[in-house]
Image (cartoon, helix red, strand yellow):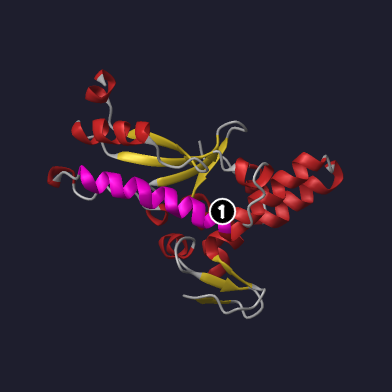
Amino acid sequence: MAALHVTDGALVVVDCVEGVCVQTETVLRQALGERVKPVLVVNKMDRCFLELHLDAEEAYLTFQRVVESANVIMATYEDAALGDIQVYPEKGTVAFSAGLHGWGFTLTNFAKMHASKFGVDEAKMMSRLWGENFFDSATRKWTYKHTGTSTCKRGFVMFCYEPIKQVIELCMSDQRDERRPKLQKELTGDRRAYNICCW
């Protein structure tokens, strides 16, 4: 509690599977009471791939519930002096991580990678990587709802979740010869593929 008097910000780490718990609410209440704006970290993302074997859409909905639950708590302790204290993945105030493996990212990382491919600025690309934004790889068009085809996927799923999942599966399978070109192809097509971690 005393540390909050001298900090500029707070990282609130939440297990993506267990979700927001009593301790999370305590930490958020204390931080907001000291007028420290929090940033949410949705941790243990690797559990979705390796332990629970969630499909990509289920994983997205799980992450979305965690963010919404944290925002409900923050709305309870809202302070006009702080302004908007809610956290939003598309604004870079939510990070996704796997602390056990030492990697993490915000949508900013993926927006930078993909913005030039789509000819849009990073802010617009970030907004497409969260929420009801779907990309159909067959038609190469964005829509606000699923078209029902197998080539249409949520932006977060197609451009963030699935590439990371593929990299992890390659690393876990010990397919050394395939690993390097796959990393380059699936993530960015350049050497930034090796740096998923933003911290």
SS state under label 1:
helix
Decide which of 73, 139 is in the foreground and name it.
73
Magenta region, mostly helix, strand or loop? Answer: helix
Specify whether residue 59 is painted magenta.
Answer: yes
Q: Is residue 87 above or below residue 35?
A: below
How far from the left and from the top, in percent, is residue 110? 54, 54
Q: Label 1 sits on what residue type? A: Ala
How far from the left and from the top, in percent, is residue 51? 66, 41
How far from the left and from the top, in percent, is residue 10? 33, 33
Specify whether residue 3 is painted magenta.
Answer: no
Q: Give the range drawn in magenta.
A: 58-77
How far from the left and from the top, in percent, is residue 181? 78, 51
Residue at 13 percent of width and 43 percent of height: 81
**In-image side of 116 versus 74 (left or right):** right
Q: Is residue 184 visible?
A: yes
Residue beneath disc 1 = 59
